[in-house]
Structure formats: structure tokens, C-alpha cells
Image (tube, rainbow, N blue to C red):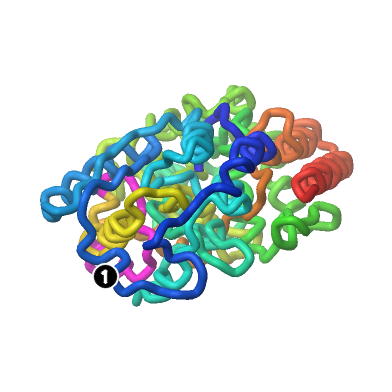
Amino acid sequence: MKLSPRQTLTGAAAVVLLASAAACSSSGSSSPSGTGISSSFGVNATGTVQFWARSVSKTLAQKLVSEFNASHKNLQVKLTLTSINDDVTSLATSIRAGDPPDVVGLNDIDVPTFTHEGAFMNLTPYISKLPYKSALSPGHVGLATYNGAEYGVPYWADLSVLWYNKTLFKQAGLNPDDPPTTYAQILSDAQAINKLGNGVSGFTFAGDCQGCLGFTVQPGIWADGSYLTSGGIGNQTASITGNQPLVQALTLYRNIWTQHLVPDNDRTDNGTTWGQDFAAGKIGIMPGGYGQVVNLVKPSQLGSEFMDTPLPGSNGGYSTFDGGDDFVIPSAAKNPSGAWEFIQWVLQTQQQVQYPALGATPIRTDVLTPSFSATNPEDAVALKALAKGYAPVTLVYDQMFNQAGGPWFQMFTTAVYDGNMSLALQQGQSGLANLLKQASQ
């Protein structure tokens, strides 16, 4: 999941690039396509594995590749970092040319576009053999599943949580050990902190960052058991009209905005400076990513001044946006067996427990042991939410949620800034419905 504005190849454009490649792509003799399974696939592979990872996971990818290569003299991984602005374009172009990498760390939201076109290997029989399959991030797995088959596994998680400033909670007379678990508590805690004055605000959000808002607002809706779309790819419909959890989420942000509980410049924050005021100690509550704040503050401030808690629904419950990347193996990969061996190694517990120090969250819920929680209390919060995480599976996520003129942001703006909930829901319903209809044609 990319949180700040981006320019990327999406939807129909990616399909155009991939369509010609799909017919001629081949999985090779060692492919796990179909229902058969080779006992030698992913075991004692040799040669070189070409691994493309998004630059946003640079630190994690470099550490994993270095350690793998040091322990596998007969199989070496060559890392190529791709720009977050054109990673989808580069991959689609390589697939069309018949020369893709062996394994890709792909933004999980973009995976359905490729699986829909048959660009990746069907890994179902191999994933089924993983003893920890049930512990894998459900949102990541869902995005890699198409027509009942699984074409990828989680690589790393970028999860949304609710950060809060314990120092400001104390100063406002609030209990720092009792973070918000409902919308009402978010609002009342933000009101109390806002009264401190001296440049302190109770809440903050990136009000002009479409992806940031999708990443942080939607989980509260999911926590209430509701979603903005329904149905599988090719048969999806919009679920905006009459969606009360959506109305409650937009109403919360409307109240926060009209009560001036956020800095005035939040409305024009496009994500490039998102979180900096929170890290400076000027904000009481901020929904955001785990790695986002970890990368902005000093390690000594985590737990003592800044702490996170799951993103709540309106009246309790919680969820998280399962952002991050999935591992996928292109159908025309030259060393798919080596790629699968590398993937399995990365998914092992001894690699997963390194993730927090590298700014990421593991993708296995069974890593959440007392020892892990004691060592990584902030990331343990995110990992706990992983079991209830979700991410929308659609071919048009970017058009719906990441674009300035998209229906999600139009709906948010009309409801939160303009105060016209009825019109906002109409815009959201028609906008999402039109995009989903186009995607199904």
C-alpha cells in the first residue's frame, strides 16, 4: 500500500499491457500450475533468482537478501529496487516482453490486476503445504486469490493503527493506559487534548491525501462489519447507499473538522508531511501506519511518549488495512523453484521476527508470542490487528481510492468539508458503481 499521492499504471492500462503477454506466457516444467505438486519445487534450487522489490521496502529487502545469500552458496538472489511510481508499469512491460523477474514484491493492492490476466503462477498446492498457512495475513492472501486459486503469499505488512501521545494524554487529564476504543472516545479525547492550546491539536489527518484517508478511515468501517463493495471480481457492486458504518465514520471526521480539533492545514496535507506534527509532540491522536511513526521518532520515544492501539470501529471492535506487499512469481520466471525456496525462507520465523527493527510488520500471526510482544510492543499492536485485517479486492482500487478526482475522495470532501452527507453518499454510490461496471466489461 502506498500512502502518499502517486502516479501509477492502473486498471485498464495494465490490462492492455498484460493482455498480449497472458496468451503466450509459460510456467515452464517446474511450474506449480494445475493441481499437481512437485516434491523438488523450491527445494535445493540452484542458480540465480532475480528479485524485484519496491524501494519502499529497501531496508527490509536488502537485509533479507544479504542473509539469504550468505547461507545459500548454490542459490543467490539478485535484488533490483523498483520505483513506487512505476513499479507496476515496469513489471507489466517485462511480462509482455517475456523477460520478467523470478519473484516480485508487489504492492498487494495491485496483485488482482495481474492475476486476472493470468500473469502469475498458481501456487495453491505449495501454499497449502505450508504448516503455518492459517497464520498468514488474510488481507494479503485475499488479494492474491482469484477464482479460488492462490497466486501469491504475503511478503511484508504495512498496517494502519491509531497512534496517540501519552504525554499529552496525561496533561489533558486522560488515562494514557486507556486509549480510544470507540469513535465517541476518539472525539472526547481529542476535545480534551485540544483544550491544552499552545499549538497542540487533539487529532490530525492528511486531508488532501486520498490514499492516506483510504488507509486510515476504511478500517473503522470494516470493524463494524461493513464494506464499500461486495461480490467478486467481474461481479462487484457498490455498497454505499444505506451504509451506516460509512456514515458514522464520515460523521466522526466531520465533527473533528468542524470542531477545529485538527490543524487548519490538515485540509491541504497531501501526505508529504503527514505525521511530522505528531512526531513533534503537537498532536494527541493520529491514525496512520506502524512503520510511518517508527521512522519519524527516536526509538526512546516509543512506548514512553508515543504508543499505538488498534483502529477502532464506532462502538468497539477493530480492524486494519492490510497494506504492504505480496510475493508473486511471474508465469514466465526462469527460476521459479529458486524463487519459491527464497520465499519460504523469508516466511520462516527467524526472518519474520527481524521485521520490526527494519520498519515493517511480520505477516504471520503466530509470530505474536509473549517474547515478541515484550521486545516489540508497538509492532505487537499492529500484528494483533493482522488477524482482523482486510484489503479491498478489486481491479480499480487506485481509481476509486487513490486519485484526487476519484469517488472516495469526492465523497469524503463533500461529507466532511461541505457537510452534505446525502450528496456525498450519492456521489460515492454512483462513482464506485461506474468504475466497477467499467472493470467488469
- Looking at the image, residue 322 sits to the left or right of residue 372; the answer is right
- Looking at the image, residue 345 sits to the left or right of residue 228; the answer is left
Q: Tell me residue 166's x, y (percent).
A: 38, 47
Please name whichever residue, 8 or 414, is drawn nearer the observer in this view of the structure.
8
Q: Tell me residue 344's x, y (percent).
A: 30, 62
What's the residue at 56%, 45% (across, down)?
Answer: 110
What's the residue at 32%, 35% (across, down)?
Answer: 80
Q: Tell me residue 289's x, y (percent).
A: 45, 44
Specify start and end residues of the magenta stretch as a single range.
357-374
Q: Does the magenta stretch include residue 302?
A: no
Q: Which residue is denoted by mark 1 in the rendering?
A: 370
- Looking at the image, residue 249 sits to the left or right of residue 135; the answer is right
User: In the figure, residue 147 lies in which quadrant?
Assistant: bottom right
- Looking at the image, residue 104 sits to the left or right of residue 297; the answer is right
User: In the figure, residue 128 lies in which quadrant?
Assistant: bottom left
| In the image, residue 157 above or below residue 283 | below
What's the residue at 35%, 55% (across, down)?
Answer: 336
Q: Tell me residue 169's x, y (percent).
A: 44, 46
Crowding around mark 1 (Cα neighbors within 10 Å: few <14, some 14 to 19, many 20+) is few
| In the image, residue 223 above or below residue 95 | below
Label 1 is placed on what type of residue?
A: Pro
Please name whichever residue, 144 or 351, is drawn nearer the observer in this view of the structure.
144
